[in-house]
Image (tube, helix red, strand yellow):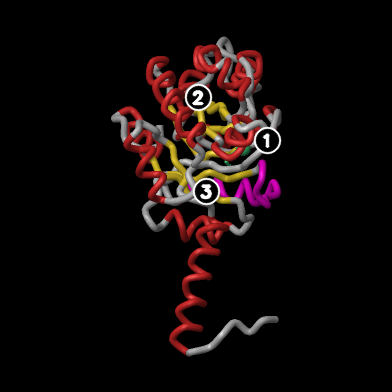
Amino acid sequence: MSDHLTGFRARLENGQAAFAAWCGMCEVHGLEVILREGYDCAVLDWQHGFHDFQSIETGIIAANGLRKPAFVRIGVGDFAQGARFLDWGAAGIIAPMINSAADAKAFAGFMKYPPMGGRSWGPPRAAAAMGFSNAEQLAKGNEATLAIAMIETREAMAELEDILAEPGIDGVFVGPADLSIALTRGSVVDPLHADVDAALTLIARKARAAGKIASAFCPDGARGAELAKRGYQILSLGTDGSMLRNAARAEIRIARGQAGQSDSGY
Ligand code: 3PY
Ligand code: MG
């Protein structure tokens, strides 16, 4: 397996967190800038980001070129598309709204070669990205690529143990915004809500008991550190959009403040 993927997996196996450059913008240069700041992997957000197929492909190539694994968060139920992204060299797929053991089995079926699943064979880019021959791709491809199920509903919480028990599921990824909406029955969206926090503790415990990876979306570095200490392993630290907004806001405030100017108002 390619050195960067081996290193990434060793990090997870040692129980360390991997901090992800979460990329919703379709401009690959932004992803490169963030990854070069020492992030451990990339997540390209197909579900809610602004990507097209070209930017997903370019993002995977750019991340692998920088020796960082690339994950793609697919749309709800886009399992066939996820399998294509694996063929393009993604190190794993994050699937939203996996709400039942049946959803988990269907997702894993697209991610894993037989006999574990029914992934169709189309490996030229994937094998090269993994550093595998075709024979190694078949023998080791399932282990080398992660199928990660998003937990973000009451239904998913109720079936969590069965979702985690699906052999083709390597881990779970908590979507705290959707989970807050679900747990408060649609009354608030608050990723830091106390009920979400309690669910995060439970999910980490159950994932650990099942020998699977617990991971989560985090809005910033402080939350990333906090969840890393609680056993979470693949963690966003905001998004490319939020980081750009925060940096842009800080600089304009400095400039206006030091120049003694008010906002232009147009
Ligand atoms: C959520 O918080 O619901 C997410 O899906 C994070 O992107
Ligand atoms: Mg979500």
Decide if residue 14 is on the left or right side of residue 55: left
- The residues colored magenta run 47-64
Instruction: Identify which amino acid the numbered label 1 is placed on.
Output: Gly
The residue at which mark 1 appears reads as 186
Residue at point 40%, 45% (across, down): 40
Q: State yes or no: Cβ of the residue under disc 1 lies below 8 Å from any atom of ligand 1.
A: no
Residue 117 found in image quarter? top right
CA–CA distance in space, label 2 to label 1: 40 Å
The residue at which mark 2 appears reads as 141
Residue 18: image location, x then y, percent: 38, 40
Instruction: Identify which amino acid the numbered label 3 is placed on.
Output: Trp
Callout in the foreground (2, 3): 3
Q: State yes or no: Cβ of the residue under disc 3 lies below 8 Å from any atom of ligand 1.
A: yes
Instruction: Identify which amino acid the numbered label 2 is placed on.
Output: Gly
Magenta includes 252? no
Q: Of all residues shown, which one is farthest toward the left?
A: 14
Residue 42: image location, x then y, percent: 49, 46
The residue at which mark 3 appears reads as 22
Residue 115 found in image quarter? top right
**Marked residue nearer the N-terminal end (2 or 3):** 3
Decide if residue 47 is on the left or right side of residue 91: right
- Label 3 Cα neighbours within 10 Å, binned few <14 / some 14-19 / many ≥20: many
